[in-house]
Image: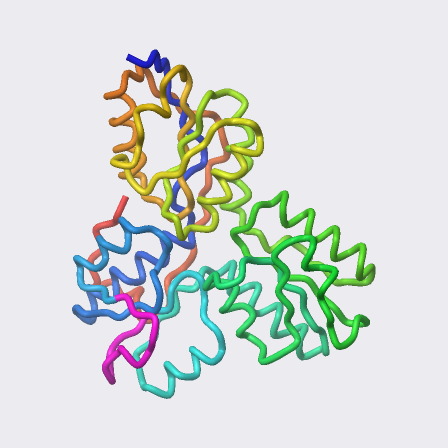
Amino acid sequence: MNGIEEVILAEPRGFCAGVDRAIEIVERAIAKFGAPIYVRHEIVHNTYVVNELKAKGAVFIEDLADVPPGATLVFSAHGVSKAVQAEARARGFEIFDATCPLVTKVHVEVAKLAKEGYEFIMIGHKGHPEVEGTMGQLSSGIHLVEDVADVAQVAPAQTAKLAVVTQTTLSVDDAAEISAAVRARFPSVREPKQQDICYATQNRQDAVKMLSPQVDLVIVVGSPTSSNSNRLRELSQRLGTESYMVDSAAELQPEWFEGKSRIGLTAGASAPEVLVREVIDRIKALGAVSVRKMDGIQETLKFPLPKGLKLDDIPPPGHIS
């Protein structure tokens, strides 16, 4: 017996509006057109969600050459480059775009300012599909920085018209620090009117900031590829609370809980609540006596579905949650 007294649930946690919408697009496309439906890249970065959709008839691919002619294709929530969009159209697929509207907002801003002659500094993680999609909105003039040290190396062709954009799932604090370095080097840089980091990323990080000081250990439910889930674990660790990220309850190690009486639990924006419930059950099996929810923001945002999937004759999908 480890003496675990209670589990405190972060609020909000788990699915955001963009993830809800992306999963619903795939489910509705399967309901309307039948399996298989092809999805470029993991629809969202969560192993459980991807496997559930595979079982329903989704086929996940990275290369459009793997999609047969005339098939239905869904772009993932992370967004895609102009080159991928053009190739998909040229191949004649029926396309549904599940790009999160908050990512699309960044793409629109980049396109608008590029027409006005701006170059861009993008704060983000190299190789992340969202970063590849945003940088791929332009053929040149967009420079990636991953940390403060990178800012000193950036060499834009001109500095009179320079704007900064951000991956939507970054650490709010890291992004602020890198933005400050960009401003220090390029004082006239244009920043977004509203920061690019999405409301859900911000809210989940704020909840962890409230949760961490109240607990002895934080467990984050999320997949290794999920940027926003990784940031939650790092944030808790940085605040001085031991923290682990798990893809499922099976990954929990009993020794993590030894000598810990209060356990904090949260989930990244692509992690379904069913996994949170399984983690709670496992911690209860290790001796937790009670579970309570922290006070927090109630998220009510819902994004509309693309045209062609709103038809009343499609039964509402059985949701993964």
Which residue appears at 46% of the width and 48% of the height? 301
Q: Is residue 202 above or below residue 40?
A: above
**Residue 67 within the segment the image draws in magenta:** yes
Q: Position of residue 87 (x, y in %)?
A: 40, 83
Which residue appears at 25% of the width and 85% of the height? 69
Foreground residue, 305 or 219?
219
**Number of on-image labels:** 0
Q: Position of residue 204 (x, y in %)?
A: 49, 39
Write down the quadrant of residue 76 in the picture: bottom left
Foreground residue, 251 or 320?
251
Quarter of the picture holding the N terminus: top left
Quarter of the picture holding the C terminus: top left
Q: Is residue 244 left or right of residue 137?
A: left
Write down the quadrant of residue 24 in the picture: bottom left
Foreground residue, 3 or 187?
3
Magenta-drawn segment? 60-74
**Residue 147 within the segment the image draws in magenta:** no
Q: Position of residue 168 (x, y in %)?
A: 54, 55
The colour style of the image is rainbow
Residue furthest bottom as drawn? 90
Q: Is residue 56 left or right of residue 124?
A: left
Q: Is residue 49 above or below residue 205?
A: below
Q: Is residue 260 above or below residue 30?
A: above
Which residue appears at 25% of the width and 49% of the height? 319
Which residue appears at 46% of the width and 41% of the height? 299
Q: Is residue 177 above or below residue 53?
A: above
Q: Position of residue 300 (x, y in %)?
A: 45, 43
